[in-house]
Image (cartoon, helix red, strand yellow):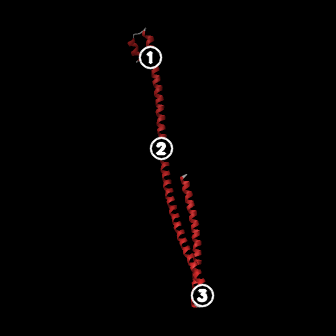
Amino acid sequence: ALKAQLQREKDEFAQQLRKLETERAVREGERDESRAQVRDLEARLETAYAQPEQNQARLRALEMELNLVRRRFAEEAAAKEAAQRIAKEARDERQRVQASLDRITAEARRLRGMVLEQEEQINFKQELTDDLQAKLREQRTEAERRIRRERGKVEAVKRLECVLPREMLMKALA
């Protein structure tokens, strides 16, 4: 679940980065267009300055237009810097998420190894337990057989006690 979440975050950051790159390209195009427009306006302004008495109103209009273009150019430059900063932050965040994902993946591998090792230990202990239980059953069976044999001897001694002396019977059964 964490890996999937980190993957979604990584995809979101990549999508955001692509969007910012597209915006940056648009801004650069607008910047280049603004620069060309500034050069044109400056040339027109110089031409107007060369004819001081003519077109005074035109000169003021060109100055206002030039100031507007310069302001727009400054805003676009600021927007470009902001987009670059955001893109850098997104790359940094993507790297942080990737590093976190790598750490989590390594931890998961380590834990899987531990689980496999514990499973092997459990299987080994189960085999030992099964072997010990089999030996215990064999010993129980052997003990029960000896007890039956000893009981049989005791019964035989009791029956023959009245016929033969006890010491002789014990020697015979031993």
Looking at the image, which residue is at 57% across and 70% down? 24
Q: Nearer the viewer, residue 61 or 171?
A: 61
Note whether 90 is above or below 1 in the view shown.
below
| Callout 2 amino acid | Gln
Relative to 96, is 63 above or below?
A: below
Q: Earlier in the sequence, mark 1 or mark 3?
A: 3
Q: Which badge, 1 or 2, comes first in the chain's sequence? A: 2
Q: Quadrant of the C terminus?
A: top left
Residue 130 versus residue 102 in the image, above or below: above
Name the amino acid type tagged 1: Lys
Picture disc at residue 153 = 1
In what element is the residue under mark 1? Answer: helix
Q: What residue does disc 3 label?
A: 56
* x and y, in percent, of residue 66 in the image: 58, 81
Q: Helix or strand or loop: what does disc 3 sit on?
A: helix
Q: Is residue 170 found left or right of 141 in the rendered image?
A: left
Residue in the picture at 57% in, 89% down: 49
